[in-house]
Amino acid sequence: MKAGIVGLPNVGKSTLFNCLSNAKAQSANFPFCTIEPNIGVVNVPDPRLQKLEELVNPERVQPATVDIVDIAGLVKGASKGEGLGNQFLGNIRECNAIIHVLRCFDNDNIIHVDGNVNPIRDKETIDIELQLKDLETVEKRLEKVRRAAKTGNKEAQAEEALLDRIRETLLQAKSARTVIPQNADEVELLESFQLITTKPVLYVCNVDEGAAATGNAYVEQVRELVKDENAEVMFLAVGTEADITELETYEERQMFLEDLGLKEPGSSALIRAAYKLLNLQTYFTAGVKEVRAWTINVGDTGPQAAGVIHTDFEKGFIRAEVIAYEDYVTYGTEAKVKEAGKLKVEGKEYIVKDGDVMHFRFNV
């Protein structure tokens, strides 16, 4: 599961990517600096992992990870191949969610491709390019489906009706994610279309250092604009975050954050938000050899969670021994949790909860 960082050139995408991944994607003051998409495997900051480490004192700790993709800057006309449009749109299509970076700071030394700072216009520029690409996809599919629908094929008629609704939505300059499926068949169909504007989106407002803790008027404009989109809006000072990652010690970084009025780097909150955006959650295994966070989809069952460790665990799943994270922390050890009767034995139908500490029994 990958989240792709998109936006116009020079809004801070590659700098943000560097903060998140500690990879050093090229970052420069001109468009198309990023040509091939950079992929960073990013650790998900999780205070629960540190707490389990304190309690268990394992030999090693392994956090959950999420893949972040730095996609080159889109420009007007990208849907028609302007700039490096087709390649970029293909990279976005391969991602499962979108982190849309908007420039929300003034700085005469950093050029803006459209001459001045206006996050509302910038958002609409990107949206229109993505919507135009989706419109092209929908219209091509409609051509094929209409022929089958005319013969009386019920499935084709249902698909045609949904495609027509999506087309009308896109023509109104709205994203396909605003189309509400009417039934389970439409949910499945919508997923099969693989439209770019159905992907969940997180808007990241890149502010200056002075607005790192409170945001600014640009951020409020963005919030007002997307209030009907069911999308989260975050703000962080990307340039400042980059400075923080360059500091040598944890103590230095904490002092810098305190001076800004922040409890943690904004990048940490952003990584967790991206993880949530991808509909992912975490369960833990905890033993003296290793305390580890495992990534699963929200709604996964016990056997599916076991399969993340090894396919044999899923095939031969017998049961899961489950301790709620809060109970593990309250009682301090697995033995004390058992004494208190808080260890649950769950079968194949169990839906794993975020933070569960699990041990699997299996037989292959």
Image: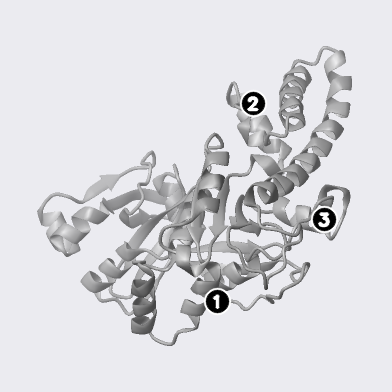
- Say what secondary structure mark 2 lies in: helix
Q: Determine the residue positioned at 36% across, 74% down.
A: 259
Q: Does label 3 or label 1 sit earlier along the sequence?
A: 1
Q: Nearer the viewer, residue 82 or 360?
A: 82
How many residues crowd around disc 1 within 10 Å: few (fewer than 14), some, or many (20 or more)?
some
- Amino acid identity at mark 3: Gly
Name the residue that disc number 3 marks.
85
Name the residue that disc number 2 marks.
186
- Say what secondary structure mark 3 lies in: helix
Query: Dividing the image into 4 quarters, which one contains the C terminus?
Result: bottom left
Q: Nearer the viewer, residue 211 or 284?
A: 211
In the orientation shown, which residue stands out farthest toward the top? Answer: 152
Q: Determine the residue positioned at 80% across, 36% down.
A: 135
- Say what secondary structure mark 1 lies in: loop
**Res 121 visible:** yes
In the orientation shown, which residue stands out farthest toward the left? Answer: 339
Real-space Cα distance between discs 3 and 1?
Answer: 27 Å
Position of 165 compared to 344: left or right? right
Name the residue that disc number 1 marks.
22
Q: Does label 2 or label 1 sit earlier along the sequence?
A: 1
Q: Determine the residue positioned at 21% across, 58% down.
A: 328
Q: Does label 3 or label 2 sit earlier along the sequence?
A: 3
Real-space Cα distance between discs 3 and 2?
Answer: 30 Å
